[in-house]
Image (cartoon, helix red, strand yellow):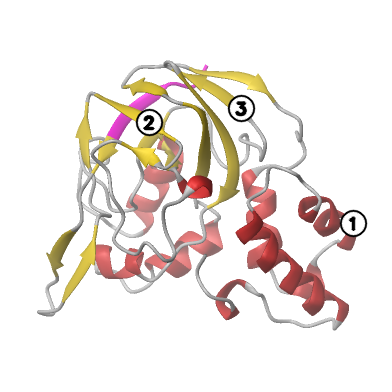
Amino acid sequence: MSHILAVKVAQVENLSLSDGSTIETAIRKKAVDKVRVHQLGAEGNDVGDKKHHGGVDKALFFMAQKSLEKLTALLKLDYDYLQDSRFGENFVVSESDENSVCIGDQYRIGSALVEVCQPRKPCNTLSKNTEVPETRKTVVETGLVGWYVRVLEDGVIAQGDKLELVKRPYPEMTVALVHGLLSQPAKNLDKTVLDKAIACAPLAEGYKKTLYKQAEKLAQQSSESAFFNTPEF
């Protein structure tokens, strides 16, 4: 059974980069033993860009241990992913990953109940934070994107807590599959699968809006993807 390997939070800070520039962000989260979570996120945690991050459908962000290890190796990053963060995750989990977690999954973790609602759509802050220009592109192309959850019941989540699967209404809608619907060239998509994803009730409305754009491109047999041609959400 999957369990929580790390819990992380951060407040917004001005992060100085090697080129002399600064970015206002809370992406570099630090490990804590436990955190109380609620509908809008985790106590002691904040986001820098409130237009594109945070809110009910991006309350908490999870990354798989396996995905972090792969990304760290691919990008040649030197840091302890259990203590620090380069990808902005609130929780690192064992066992589970983008291929095994599904949209609509409900998990009891500690005393909280959460529901998986969308893959992460990586923004350019990832590349700025790691100072590796190809970071965002690598995350998108590998599908090692992580997933957001909404909080259905407030509670406390601690390091070591198990992820107890309570409900899985859409076993075919893995995080990896839904990410692929947005990141692939539209003409390569299966319309039936795309339509099913759009009709998936727990999938965040913001994500669905971009899938609608993919559907339009598919109808045009476009070789483009909606991924890099729509605003962050």
Of circles 3 and 2, which is in front?
A: 2
Q: Which residue is mark 3?
A: 106
Image coordinates for residue 154, horizontal then vertical, percent: 44, 25
What residue lies at 50% left-to-right and 46% top-to-bottom? 56
The x and y percentages for residue 216 are 80, 77
Q: Is residue 3 magenta?
A: yes
Quote the CA–CA distance across marks 2 and 1. Answer: 36 Å
Dot 3 or dot 2: first in sequence order is 2
Where is residue 193, by image quadrant?
Answer: bottom right
Q: What crowding class fits label 3: few (fewer than 14 Cα within 10 Å), some (14-19), or many (20 or more)?
A: many
Q: Nearer the viewer, residue 226 or 75?
A: 226
The residue shown at (77%, 46%) is 200
Q: Is residue 168 magenta?
A: no
Query: Which residues lie in the magenta part?
Result: 1-7
Task: Give, as a three-letter code, the residue at label 3.
Answer: Gln
Q: Which residue is mark 2?
A: 37
Which residue is labeled 1 in the image? 192
